[in-house]
C-alpha cells in the first residue's frame, strides 16, 4: 500500500529527472533558449505535480485522470528533448539517457492507470 505520493517510484523517478534537467539548465547547457527552457521546466515539473495532485485528491477516478495528465507531460517533455537534441543543445548520450527515463516513467504511469482501472480500490474519499 502506498501511503503518500513520495512513496511512489514513478514520482521519485520524475523528481530525479527534474533534478538532472534542472542542473543542465543551471549549468547553461541550453544557452539562451529561454522559451524551450521554460517549456521543459514546465513539463518535467508537471509530471511530478500531477502525480502528487492526483494522489492527494483521494479518489481513484481523479487519480487516474491526473496520472493521464502526467503521462501527457511525459510526451511533451520527450518532444522537447528531441528539439534540444536537434538544436545541438544535448549530445546523443544525454538525449538517449533523458528520453529513456521519460519513456520509463510514462510506462510506469500507464501500468498504474491500467491497474487502477481494473481494481476496486476506491481511494480515501471513495468516489
Image (cartoon, helix red, strand yellow):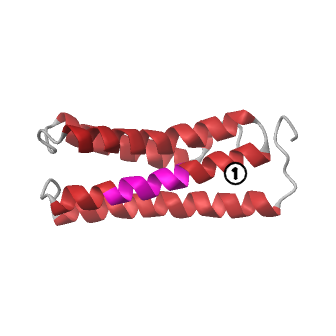
Q: Is residue 107 left or right of residue 63?
A: left
Is residue 121 in the magenta section? Answer: no
Residue 17 drawn at (x, y percent): 38, 47
Q: Is residue 63 visible from the viewing direction of this image?
A: yes
Q: Residue at x 68, y 58 (%)?
A: 113
Residue at the (18%, 66%) spot, across then down: 92
Indicate the quadrant where residue 116 lies: bottom right
The answer to whether residue 72 is left or right of residue 8 is left
The kind of secondary structure element at disc 1 is: helix
Question: What range of the chain is rendered magenta?
Answer: 70-79
Q: Which one is nearer the viewer's eye here, 119 or 62?
A: 62
* Residue 76 lies in the magenta-colored region: yes
Q: Main secondary structure of the magenta part?
A: helix
Please tell me how crowded label 1 is: few (under 14), some (14-19), or many (20+) other residues with Cα within 10 Å. Answer: many
122 vs 12, left or right, is: right
Q: Which residue is mark 1?
A: 64
Amino acid at each position: 500500500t502506498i501511503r503518500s505520493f513520495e512513496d511512489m517510484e514513478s514520482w521519485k523517478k520524475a523528481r530525479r529527472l527534474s533534478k538532472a534537467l534542472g542542473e543542465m539548465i543551471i549549468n547553461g547547457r541550453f544557452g539562451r533558449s529561454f522559451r524551450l527552457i521554460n517549456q521543459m521546466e514546465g513539463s518535467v515539473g508537471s509530471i511530478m505535480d500531477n502525480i502528487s495532485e492526483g494522489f492527494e485528491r483521494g479518489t481513484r477516478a481523479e487519480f487516474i485522470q491526473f496520472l493521464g495528465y502526467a503521462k501527457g507531460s511525459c510526451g511533451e517533455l520527450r518532444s522537447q528533448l528531441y528539439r534540444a537534441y536537434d538544436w545541438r543543445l544535448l549530445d546523443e548520450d544525454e538525449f538517449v539517457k533523458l528520453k529513456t527515463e521519460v519513456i520509463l516513467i510514462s510506462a510506469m504511469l500507464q501500468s498504474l492507470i491500467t491497474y487502477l482501472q481494473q481494481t476496486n480500490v476506491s481511494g480515501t474519499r471513495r468516489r
